[in-house]
Amino acid sequence: MTPAKSPIPEGLHTVTPHLVVKNAAQAIEFYKKAFGAQERSRFEMPGGTIGHAELKIGDSSIFLADEMPGPAGAQSPQSVGSSTCTLNLYVNDADKLFEQAVNAGGKSVMPPADMFWGDRYGTLTDPFGHVWSIATHIEDLTSEEIGQRAQEFFSKMQPMQKTA
């Protein structure tokens, strides 16, 4: 056994999303079609479930696994009824990748549009319940410019209600 050269494995970053899905094998195929993911590893458990897989999308990795009921309580968005986070994916052409992901089976939530913070940005839900934003950075803005644009943007919206 060789000691690790670094506390963070090569090719990974400090934070790596770990998705729990129903039918990880199908999810892997969706992420390949939708986002051009490359499968780096897969560990199958007895019975055919995937206990751990690593995919690379662009320069970033994500982990994913099938649901595992029990003490760990690893459940998918489909089992709990919602996703509690959004995975943000920066790409060269948000419109093109958004269309590719929808054609692969994703559901459009908000088609790409130019946003006040300087990104072309849209959101979709994948067939496994995870929410993805797809963005292309189109303008470099100062904090002041973003703040001014945000005020203009929100002045046109209905007030949002806080949830308890």
Image: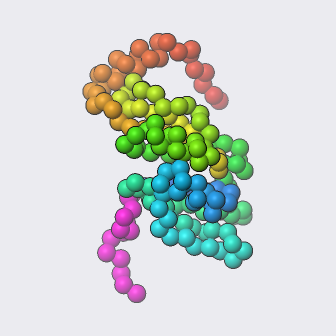
User: What range of the chain is rendered magenta?
Assistant: 1-14
Which quadrant would the N terminus be assigned to in this image?
Answer: bottom left
The magenta stretch spans residue 27: no
Q: Nearer the viewer, residue 31 or 149?
A: 31
Which quadrant would the C terminus be assigned to in this image?
Answer: top right
Report the side of 51 relative to 57 (left or right).
right
Q: Nearer the viewer, residue 36 or 78?
A: 36
Q: Position of residue 119 (x, y in %)?
A: 38, 32
Display colour scheme: rainbow
- Kindly identify the residue that appears in the image at 47 percent across and 12 percent down: 155
Please count the marks in the image: 0
Q: Nearer the viewer, residue 148 or 103?
A: 103
Q: Main secondary structure of the magenta part?
A: loop
Q: Position of residue 42 (x, y in %)?
A: 55, 70
The magenta stretch spans residue 3: yes
Q: Position of residue 101 (x, y in %)?
A: 54, 45
- Kindly identify the residue that appears in the image at 57 percent across and 20 percent down: 160
Q: Nearer the viewer, residue 4 or 96?
A: 96
Position of 125 relative to 115 (above/below) = below
- The answer to whether any part of residue 86 appears in the image is no
Position of 92 relative to 114 (above/below) = below
- Kindly identify the residue that appears in the image at 53 percent across and 36 percent down: 123
Q: Position of residue 130 (x, y in %)?
A: 60, 46
- Kindly identify the residue that appears in the image at 67 percent across and 69 percent down: 49
- The answer to whether any part of residue 116 appears in the image is yes
Q: Quadrant of residue 10?
A: bottom left
Position of 121 relative to 154 (above/below) = below
